[in-house]
Image (spheres, grey):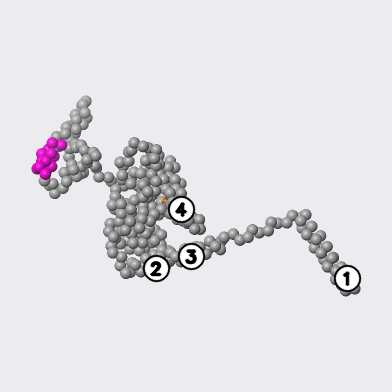
């Protein structure tokens, strides 16, 4: 029969309309008279079981972001109260994210040792043009150090797009605990895959210090540094000292290797045929002169 579909659709809309008021009446004591009904009214209204049509009064009210929501990326740094490397970059400036970024909106300047001028594994500068970034998440997917993550902060509008929308390292950097707070289960999965809550390099050093290699058992994930900062125990201090020792050894070995690899004096350029002939002639003449002097001396 014509019009049944339209009538059904209108009934669905009307039901939502009615449910809005039914829900309001059921929650009236809580929502309008100040009681919380054991839950916040906003969460009740916006939860999966909510019935009816409700307006989110943005910006006073905001919908909760799904854990895998992704907006402009940020750089992970150690928590500022980390016992060994407070505020240290997780990024090693390997450049993979800049390479895979489809619209090419990442620009990295690799850091260098002020004394030796050799490159060091940390970025001196890191920029993302957030107007060009399309929030695809490739950079976060490809980073081998879990150092760049997709953010939940979508309120980035500003009146000046020239400088405000080019995010530099200071603007991009956020503590590891922030990542754990916005994506707890993803952070946990990653920590499990890395073998601990620390930076992959630290985990590797700790495994080496413990005498493990490739086959060594992964370090226990333990308490995420982002969620709590447990006091450093004597054992942990010893481990971090050992790790620091290993790091120093690795650095010394690398320095030694670099010295070995430093180019020696330039090899002499190959002689042309003409020069060779000249050198032979000179040698013969020297030899003849020497023979003559010897003969004269003998007489
Ligand atoms: S964020 Fe990750 S992929 Fe990008 S340069 Fe740093 S370590 Fe490499
Ligand atoms: S999210 Fe995509 S577009 Fe944005 S910086 Fe990362 S790779 Fe580039």
Q: What residue would you read off at disc 4? A: 111
Q: Which residue is mark 3?
A: 252
Picture coordinates of residue 5, whole percent (x, y)? 22, 30
* Mark 1 within 8 Å of ligand 1, using the beta carbon: no
Q: Position of residue 86 (x, y in %)?
A: 35, 58
Is the Cβ of the residue at disc 1 closer than 8 Å to that at disc 3?
Answer: no
Report the span colored magenta. Answer: 20-34
Whether pointer 4 and pointer 2 mark residues with C-beta atoms closer than 8 Å, the reply is no
Distance between the alpha carbons at the discs numbered 1 and 2: 77 Å
As helix, strand or loop, the secondary structure at mark 3 comes to helix
Along the polypeptide, which appears first: circle 1 or circle 2? 2
Residue pointed to by mark 1: 296
How far apart, in angstroms, are the residues tagged by discs 3 and 2?
15 Å
Q: Nearer the viewer, mark 1 or mark 2?
A: 1
**Spatial distance from mark 4 to mark 1, Cα to Cα?**
71 Å
Measure how far apart labels 4 and 2 are at the Cα level.
26 Å
């Amino acid at each position: 029969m014509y019009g049944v579909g339209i009538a059904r659709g209108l009934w669905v809309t009307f039901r939502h309309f009615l449910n809005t008021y039914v829900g309001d009446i059921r929650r009236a004591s809580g929502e309008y008279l100040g009681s919380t009904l054991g839950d916040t009214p906003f969460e009740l209204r916006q939860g999966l079981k909510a019935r009816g049509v409700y307006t989110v009064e943005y910006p006073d009210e905001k919908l909760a972001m799904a854990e895998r929501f992704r907006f402009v990326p940020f750089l992970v740094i150690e928590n500022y109260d980390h016992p060994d490397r407070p505020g240290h970059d997780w990024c090693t400036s390997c450049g993979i994210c800049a390479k895979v970024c489809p619209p090419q909106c990442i620009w990295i300047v690799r850091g260098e040792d002020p004394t030796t001028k050799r490159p060091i594994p940390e970025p001196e500068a890191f920029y993302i043009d957030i107007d060009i970034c399309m929030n695809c998440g490739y950079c976060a997917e490809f980073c081998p150090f879990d150092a760049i993550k997709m953010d939940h902060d979508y309120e980035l509008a500003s009146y000046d797009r020239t400088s405000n929308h080019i995010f530099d390292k200071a603007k991009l950097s956020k503590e590891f605990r922030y990542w754990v707070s916005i994506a707890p289960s993803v952070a946990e999965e990653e920590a499990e895959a890395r073998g601990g809550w620390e930076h992959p390099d630290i985990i590797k050093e700790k495994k080496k210090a413990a005498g493990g290699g490739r086959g060594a058992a992964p370090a226990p994930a333990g308490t995420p540094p982002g969620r709590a900062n447990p006091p450093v125990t004597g054992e942990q201090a010893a481990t971090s000292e050992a790790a620091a020792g290993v790091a120093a050894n690795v650095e010394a070995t690398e320095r030694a290797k670099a010295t070995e690899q430093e180019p020696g004096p330039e090899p002499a350029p190959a002689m042309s045929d003409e020069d060779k002939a000249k050198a032979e002639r000179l040698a013969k003449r020297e030899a003849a002169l020497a023979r003559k002097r010897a003969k004269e001396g003998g007489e």
